[in-house]
Amino acid sequence: MQLKPINTFTVTLMLFFIFLVLSLSGILQFPSLSTSIQQFNNPGPSKIESTPHPFTDLLGAFRKWDSQVGCVRFRERYRDLIQAGGNGSASLQEIGGDSECGGLKMNHVSVLVKGWTWIPDNLDNLYSCRCGLSCLWTKSSVLADKPDALLFETTTPPLQRHSGNPLRIYMDLEAGRKRSGQEDIFISYHAEDDVQSTYAGALFHNGRNYHVSSYKKNDTLVYWSSSRCLPQRNRLAKSLLQLLPHHSFGKCLNNVGGRNMALTLYPECANDASVTPKWWDHLHCAMSHYKFVLAIENTVTESYVTEKLFYALDSGAVPIYFGAPNVMDFVPPHSIIDGNKFSSMDELASYVKELANNPVAYAEYHAWRRCGVLGNYVKSRAASLDTLPCRLCEAVSRRGGRNAGA
């Protein structure tokens, strides 16, 4: 039996219905000519225009962002910061090049760290620095039997320094940044002091488990951890967290049943099966399962941007930050949510919820890392604890070490 030929109208109608089904199922996706995210450096209460999509796969969000926005557009948006290598802010000390080598008076400098200090032991090393300078940083008086400088942190330097004695260095990275009054060189987090040390370096979080999850919780949006329950910080945290689904670890406002519950929730965060972990050992790994991490400084003051913020960035979460008013001078472009830019907690919570349901807008907060758009973060890392030994030894060398005037 011969089949009747299908007319053109029937074929067209069938193709139309097939196309419609594929489009609605999401199999066919078309890149947008304009991004669905707001273009602003310091995100405030602007609405995110998108169709809600409560995603959990971070890598999937990255793929959507790549197809709809991409690194070319992101770099263009922050072109000025890329070309300038930062925004020229006075918040960070300029780390000079080899052109400044002429001021050095010594080719080798030894710094002996005195007394207890929170500085990690693996900072102890012999460094090959720029300008042909070598730098010994050590806690051992055997290795540095005739040090050029003594570094104090929790104890004060000697009241007087006589000619031929080591230079006295005092370091205070806390918010007060109080000088001892007896030092020759003062180290703090602030650019106005002799030597700056930001919290942006890797040495502030040694020995942790750095497993980063690609899965982001969608029923619990915010991670919060604090074990120093300052009343003002607790009130601020509570006012936001009561508006958002969250997990609170640590002592303060704990709602998960204990500080070490992260290992129960995320067993892959156990760093070493032979060692009983402390709650801070799995800090980064636990953070990585959440879309947002609440970071609140103990003290709000200019340039005091601590590891609380940089831990969250390193974990692959988006920090919700309350702290230094000039925080954007220390972080990559479009990498954090500055809570101070919102007029109310309700406004901030609404923005966070909208962002959590928009994979493209959320992925934009990770674009700086994926596209290499670091802005002023380059300078923030260059002035961190990671580079402190060489920079401090340069300062000692310029003064002549033991040969400096009393």
Image (tube, rainbow, N blue to C red):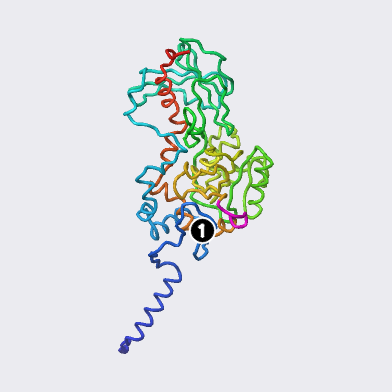
Give percent across and percent down for residue 206. 50, 33
**Could you tell me which quadrant the N terminus lies in?**
bottom left
Q: Which residue is drawn at 58% across and 55% down?
A: 348
The image quarter in which residue 275 lies = top right
Q: Residue at x 40, y 43 (%)?
A: 86
Q: In this view, does 229 lie to the left or right of 32?
A: right
Give percent across and percent down for residue 325. 54, 44
Give percent across and percent down for residue 82. 37, 46
Q: Is residue 335 above or below residue 174?
A: below
**Residue picked out by circle 1:** 55
Furthest toward the front, the residue is 405
Q: In this view, does 392 lie above or below 402?
A: below
Give percent across and percent down for residue 56. 51, 56
Q: Which of 156 and 27 is in front in this view?
A: 156
Q: Nearer the viewer, residue 238 or 394?
A: 394
Q: Which residue is drawn at 43% across and 16% down?
A: 401
What secondary structure is found at the residue carrying circle 1?
loop
Q: Is residue 95 left or right of residue 268?
A: left
Q: Which amino acid does label 1 sit on?
A: Phe
Q: How many marks?
A: 1
Q: Residues within 10 Å of mark 1 (few under 14, many from 20)?
A: some
Residues rendered magenta in the picture: 341-348
Q: Is residue 78 left or right of residue 212?
A: left
Q: In this view, does 215 lie above or below 274?
A: below
Q: In this view, does 314 lie to the left or right of 67?
A: right
Magenta span: chief secondary structure: helix
Q: Please say whether residue 304 is one of the residues in the magenta stretch.
A: no
Q: In this view, does 216 lie above or below 2?
A: above
